[in-house]
Image (cartoon, rainbow, N blue to C red):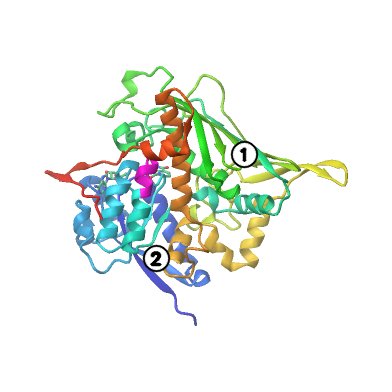
């Protein structure tokens, strides 16, 4: 029988998203024979002692494997990889500390809050020879692969415009949605709001399907436009992020890209994503921001709904065939379930953590995995352009964005009674 390889994981940050990671690890364990590998979480670090204890109890960890100071966890020599589940502006200091301690790193999205910070992590991984991967569930499905293939095969002709609108009316995490931590609206912890929080998924997917076109310039608007009810703001940092991010980007290949997202506004909820090409148009319906079949609750009946929210990622092609106008539904979610059953290797491309583990084990390499850190960095180049354009009141060039991209990562944090200064040099 084929040996099942095991990756030993240390998690840093035991908040909301860590539970989804644990659910996915549990599904990976159940499908280990099919995958040929599995993962075991052997240690956790969390600064909040109560949360740490509850987490350890829930997942059956010994007290000796539970740390309030992540630096202690990083001293262990029986861990293969670190899974970073802290908030955005801690991704840089904690991921870099983990890489400096000798670990490969899997990190939650957005990789960071700015292009500058995203590049730090990529450069650190490169210089120290570590593997590094970012959660980007919007890529891990047949919707994205089909869109990318259709464009690469020329089915749209020459793409010349892309539109991406995700408008929500009351969806400020931690404010309208109390199940999320209030760090989502803290400038210090999150860096920015929906422009990067959702942007990493939807702009990242758009850039990937378009073949990562080179950015030329961005004009944008980003504001905290809506009135706030002070009684609902419980984070001591206050509400410091935008509720609207809107931009127009030009690429070197002449393509235009319009992006609009809101976490709150006085209109109505809708989303509208499409690409226009000289021969065909493609609508992207229900970009997946929650994860595929590995992210569904463990032990759920089979066949599972593809996306836990029940909104299946689909495409619609608009164009002409033999002189007749057509509208074609490529049935992505149905075909994906068949594909998963007939081609076991495709499983490596259908979940973030599965892809990470396969990359970590050398089953996938830099050419065959999705390069999520680079895609995330290209997304941040566009979103930094939106913020810079808002600040300067004009269109900004890609060189300006690169030069002026700010360092937003947290430089210090209280851990227990100590004020820890982070050293991100490498
Ligand atoms: N919540 C979601 O649905 C969701 C979905 C996708 C991605 N994410 C991303 O995951 C990240 C975390 O989000 P979350 O919702 O889990 O936030 P959270 O606040 O629930 O969890 C973060 C945890 O990190 C802990 N922490 C902070 N500093 C630490 C340190 N130095 N060492 C150890 N632990 C530390 C906090 O105490 C907290 O428990 C964010 O970047 C977010 O964008 C969240």
Task: Pick out the residue farthest to the bottom.
Answer: 1
**Label 2: few (<14), some (14–19) or many (≥20) C-alpha neighbours in 10 Å:** many
Horizontal arrangement in the rendering, residue 47 relative to residue 284 (left or right):
left
**Vertical placement of residue 132 versus 315, above or below:** below
Task: Using the numbered discs, state the Cα–Cα distance from disc 1 to disc 2 in whole angstroms.
Answer: 45 Å
- Residue 248 coordinates in the image, percent (x, y): 55, 31
Q: Residue at x 71, y 43 (%)?
A: 316
Q: Quadrant of ligand 1?
A: top left
Viewer-closest of 355 and 57: 355
Q: Residue at x 27, y 48 (%)?
A: 93
User: Can the viewer see residue 274?
Assistant: no
The stretch of residues the image draws in magenta is 112-119
Mark sitting on residue 39: 2
Label the magenta part by its dominant secondary structure. helix
**Vertical placement of residue 217 versus 309, above or below:** above
Under circle 1, the secondary element is loop
Mark sitting on residue 254: 1
């Amino acid at each position: 029988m084929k040996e099942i390889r095991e990756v030993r994981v240390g998690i840093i940050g035991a908040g909301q998203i860590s539970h989804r990671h644990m659910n996915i690890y549990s599904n990976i364990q159940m499908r280990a024979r099919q995958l040929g590998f599995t993962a075991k979480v052997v240690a956790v670090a969390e600064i909040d002692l109560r949360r740490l204890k509850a987490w350890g109890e829930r997942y059956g960890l010994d007290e000796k494997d539970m740390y309030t100071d992540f630096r202690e966890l990083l001293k262990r020599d029986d861990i293969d990889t670190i899974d970073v589940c802290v908030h955005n502006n801690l991704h840089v200091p904690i991921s870099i500390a983990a890489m400096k301690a000798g670990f490969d790193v899997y990190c939650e999205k957005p990789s960071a809050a700015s292009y500058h910070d995203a590049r730090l992590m990529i450069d650190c991984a490169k210089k120290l020879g570590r593997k590094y991967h970012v959660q980007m569930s919007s890529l891990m499905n047949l919707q994205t692969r089909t869109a990318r293939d259709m464009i690469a095969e020329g089915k749209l002709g020459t793409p010349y415009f892309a539109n991406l609108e995700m408008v929500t009316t009351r969806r400020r995490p931690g404010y309208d949605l109390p199940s999320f931590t209030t760090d989502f609206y803290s400038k210090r912890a999150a860096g920015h709001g929906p422009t990067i929080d959702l942007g990493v998924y939807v702009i990242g997917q758009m850039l990937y399907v378009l073949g990562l076109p080179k950015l030329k310039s961005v004009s944008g608007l980003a504001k905290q436009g809506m009135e706030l009810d002070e009684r609902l703001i419980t984070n001591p940092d206050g509400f410091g992020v935008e509720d609207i991010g809107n931009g127009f980007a030009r690429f070197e290949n002449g393509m235009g890209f319009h992006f609009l997202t809101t976490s709150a506004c006085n209109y109505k909820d809708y989303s509208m994503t499409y690409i226009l090409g000289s021969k065909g148009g493609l609508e992207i319906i229900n970009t997946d921001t929650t994860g595929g079949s590995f992210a569904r609750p463990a032990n759920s009946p089979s066949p599972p709904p593809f996306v836990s929210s029940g909104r299946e990622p689909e495409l619609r092609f608009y164009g002409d065939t033999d002189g007749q106008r057509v509208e074609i539904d490529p049935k992505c979610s149905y075909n994906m379930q068949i594909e998963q059953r007939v081609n076991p290797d495709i499983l490596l491309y259908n979940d973030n953590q599965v892809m990470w583990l396969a990359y970590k084990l050398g089953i996938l390499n830099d050419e065959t995995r999705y390069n999520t850190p680079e895609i995330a960095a290209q997304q941040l180049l566009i979103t930094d352009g939106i913020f810079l354009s808002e600040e300067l009141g004009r269109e900004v060039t890609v060189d300006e964005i690169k030069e002026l991209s700010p360092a937003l990562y947290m430089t210090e944090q209280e851990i227990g009674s100590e004020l820890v200064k982070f050293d991100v040099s490498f």
